[in-house]
Image: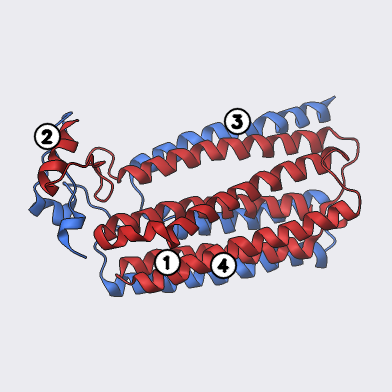
């Protein structure tokens, strides 16, 4: 991969720092990016982790179906078990496949704000349900 | 033409308006522009599907009786589809990893497998819908089937959208590799993030609709 293709036009506008090509080669304009310039060994190690996560997701999918069919759980418990397994699976996908374990603060901030609004969306019908149960 | 674009013309010696920071991270955000863009888009998608999950809870808790998914829907094709989507999620990251290793051939193979997984998912979904129609279950049948067809249909549209993008990167889009391999690799990472989100939605759709 030639360095020419890796370099971006950077200009001292809008208060942005000036990044020289030499500095950019290693630090990307002063910002370290964990997803770039990994050694082949590191990438191959990541691939092994991806395959391990894939195996875990397959096992957990089997566990979701088995928990529903093998154990005759009351609906409340069945919902709890299914959602816990789904949450674990979602965490694996988000952390490893979507690289959220090593993402930038801005992305975490965007997701935190999204989580607040999502929680509100889910809280609305749950609050309604609790309200009905109280009557 | 802004300062970045003028710089790009100066750098490359030809008149093309280049979008800056499509490979290297923007210093103030810490990520390249497309990555921030896809995360903002995914945030809006969380709200879209979140509203539907909220509706599902409201309909279910408000109904005097609610069908049990495993007794009403077709669990086997949905379970197979869950495995298919998980497999496609891992093939996307394998495509990205191989492109980072500089291996376009393997990268394209894994993009192709991902595309095939998407196609298989849609075919199984079509089969599953046909079984429902045979049993005279339509979106208008009741609230359960209304929300089932809405959520799985919208999810299916997202799968279709991802397939179109993968098909582009497998064919015309891969020409970028010759001139800008790092940018092409980032494009695969970005579409991969979208594809993982589609997988994430299915991870919650599967138990809530089909099993509970």
Which image quarter holds the C terminus of chain A?
top right
Q: In the image, which disc is placed on residue B95?
A: 1
Residue B104 is left or right of residue B157, and the answer is left
Q: Residue at x 58, y 59 (%)?
A: A89
Front residue (pair B78, B182): B182
The residue pinned by badge 2 equals: A12
Front residue (pair A121, B123): B123
- Identify the hue of chain B: red
The residue pinned by badge 3 equals: A120
Q: Residue at x 77, y 26 (%)?
A: A131
Q: Secondary structure at mark 1?
A: helix
Residue B123 in the image: state x and y as whole percent: 69, 61
Residue A60 in the image: state x and y as whole percent: 64, 65
The residue pinned by badge 4 equals: B87
Q: Which tag is nearer the camera, tag 3 or tag 2?
A: 2
The Cα atoms of the two marked residues, 4 and 1, are separated by: 12 Å
Residue B182 is left or right of residue A8, and the answer is right
Residue B28 is left or right of residue B106, and the answer is left
């Amino acid at each position: 991969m030639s360095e020419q293709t890796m370099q971006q036009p950077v200009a001292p506008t809008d208060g942005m720092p000036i990044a020289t090509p030499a500095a950019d080669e290693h630090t990307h304009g002063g910002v370290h990016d964990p997803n770039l310039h990994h050694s082949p060994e590191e990438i191959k190690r990541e691939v092994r982790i991806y395959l391990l996560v894939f195996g875990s997701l397959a096992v957990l999918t089997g566990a979701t179906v088995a928990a529903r069919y093998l154990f005759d759980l009351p609906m409340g418990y069945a919902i709890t078990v299914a959602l816990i397994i789904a949450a674990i699976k979602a965490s694996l996908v988000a952390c490893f496949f979507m690289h959220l374990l090593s993402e930038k603060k801005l992305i975490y901030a965007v997701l935190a704000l999204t989580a607040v609004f999502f929680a509100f969306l889910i809280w609305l019908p749950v609050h309604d349900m609790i309200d009905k149960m109280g009557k | 033409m802004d300062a970045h674009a003028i710089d790009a013309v100066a750098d490359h010696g030809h008149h093309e308006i280049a979008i800056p920071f499509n490979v290297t991270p923007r210093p103030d955000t810490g990520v390249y522009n497309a990555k921030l863009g896809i995360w903002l888009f995914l945030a809006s998608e969380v709200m879209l599907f979140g509203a539907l999950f909220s509706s599902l809870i409201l309909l279910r808790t408000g109904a005097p009786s609610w069908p049990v998914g495993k007794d009403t829907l077709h669990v086997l094709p949905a379970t197979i589809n869950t495995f298919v989507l998980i497999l496609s999620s891992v093939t996307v990251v394998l495509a990205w990893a191989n492109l980072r290793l500089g291996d376009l051939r393997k990268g394209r193979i894994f993009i192709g497998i991902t595309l095939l997984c998407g196609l298989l998912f849609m075919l199984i979904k079509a089969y599953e819908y046909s079984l429902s129609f045979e049993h005279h279950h339509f979106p208008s049948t009741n609230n359960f089937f209304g929300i089932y067809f809405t959520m799985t249909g919208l999810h299916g549209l997202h799968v279709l959208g991802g397939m179109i993008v993968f098909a582009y990167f497998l064919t015309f889009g891969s020409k970028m590799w010759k001139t800008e391999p790092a940018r092409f690799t980032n494009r695969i990472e970005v579409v991969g993030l979208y594809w993982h989100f589609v997988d994430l939605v299915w991870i919650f759709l599967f138990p809530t609709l089909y099993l509970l």
